[in-house]
């Protein structure tokens, strides 16, 4: 049985870890205009799923079958092994509109702000990466993500992990674009810095107002590193409705900042209960 001292030590350590997680997040903030980003022009996407195949191979999972795939033949959801997929939607033109789904790599990610052990990190260059060696499996990140991206490795009973797109941070460090961008045959995906890509998105929309109706990712939840240009309103393409323009950690930290005091308070309360039971002869 764990002693009272051991319990309080663990509680204090956990509390300091939670406070430390915010420090890691704060230190990695950089100029959003310089962050790595991808512009997704959905009017150019043909639904070939080359991006999905490249992502699977890069992550070490089996690629897509070589037989013709066709519309709607994909996995249809993000999973631990499927870090990106093509979601086929019916837009306002009543035609199938392929929409690429993956981690949006928010400028101020909610998943990072709620992780009590800093297993998720927002790097200075843009990617949100996952450190499985420190993850405790609490799954707060899964609950916090407004886009439903992070997925749990349910079929691993021993050491389950969280799976999500890491923006090919290793490839970026080598000066290469993400695998999905490199595999795209139609120019749907363009890799660069967020400030430059936002300017290009606005220029395309201004030059062709009859082709584009929306830019998505410029302001939602404080801005994301994946920016979509679309001929269909985002809400018709399955993007979450009602998300605020402000960064979500401003909201999550109001709750998570209280966690250290809750942990310590519970520890002290249990310590008093144990002491009372011991003195009263109930132990």
Image: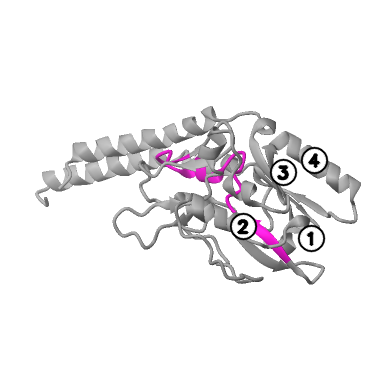
Q: Mark 1 points at which residue?
A: 232
Cα separation, mark 1 vs mark 4, equals 18 Å
Q: What element carries label 2?
A: helix
Q: In this view, does 131 lie to the left or right of 84?
A: left
- Of badges 2 and 3, the one in the foreground is 2
Position of residue 142 in the picture relative to residue 245 (left or right):
left
Identified at 54% across, 30% down, the residue is 28
Quote the CA–CA distance across marks 2 and 1.
23 Å
The alpha-carbon separation of the residues under discs 3 and 1 comes to 18 Å
Is 154 positioned to the left or the right of 127 in the image?
left
* Residue carrying label 3: 219
The residue tagged 2 is 50
Residue beneath disc 4:
200
Tell me which label, 2 or 3, sits earlier in the chain.
Answer: 2
119 magenta-colored: yes
Mark whose residue sits in front, 3 or 1? 1
62 or 23, nearer to the observer: 62
**Tag 2–tag 1 contact (CB < 8 Å):** no
Q: How far apart are marks 2 and 3 (CA)?
A: 28 Å
Which span of residues is magenta-colored? Answer: 97-120
Answer with left or right where residue 266 lies relative to residue 193.
left
């Amino acid at each position: 049985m764990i002693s009272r001292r051991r319990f309080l030590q663990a509680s204090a350590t956990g509390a300091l870890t939670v406070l430390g997680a915010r420090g890691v997040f704060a230190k990695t903030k950089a100029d959003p205009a310089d962050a790595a980003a991808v512009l997704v022009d959905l009017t150019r996407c043909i639904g070939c799923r080359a991006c999905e195949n490249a992502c699977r191979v890069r992550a070490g999972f089996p690629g897509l079958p070589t037989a013709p795939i066709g519309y709607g033949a994909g996995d249809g959801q993000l999973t631990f092994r499927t870090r990106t997929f093509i979601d086929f939607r019916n837009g306002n033109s009543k035609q199938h509109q392929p929409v690429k789904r993956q981690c949006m790599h928010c400028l101020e990610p909610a998943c990072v702000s709620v992780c009590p052990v800093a297993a998720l990190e927002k790097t200075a260059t843009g990617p949100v990466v996952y450190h499985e060696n420190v993850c405790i499996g609490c799954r707060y990140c899964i609950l916090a993500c407004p886009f439903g991206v992070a997925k749990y490795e349910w079929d691993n009973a021993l050491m389950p992990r969280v799976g999500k797109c890491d923006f090919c941070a290793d490839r970026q460090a080598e000066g290469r674009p993400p695998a999905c961008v490199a595999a795209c045959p139609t120019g749907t995906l363009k890799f660069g810095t967020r400030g430059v890509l936002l300017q290009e998105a606005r220029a395309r929309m201004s030059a062709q107002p009859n082709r584009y109706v929306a830019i998505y990712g410029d302001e939602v939840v404080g801005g994301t590193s994946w920016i979509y240009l679309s001929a269909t309103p985002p809400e018709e393409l399955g993007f979450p409705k009602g998300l605020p323009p402000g960064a979500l950690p401003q909201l999550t930290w109001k709750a998570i900042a209280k966690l250290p005091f809750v942990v310590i308070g519970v520890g002290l309360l249990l310590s008093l209960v144990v002491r009372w039971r011991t003195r009263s002869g109930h132990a």
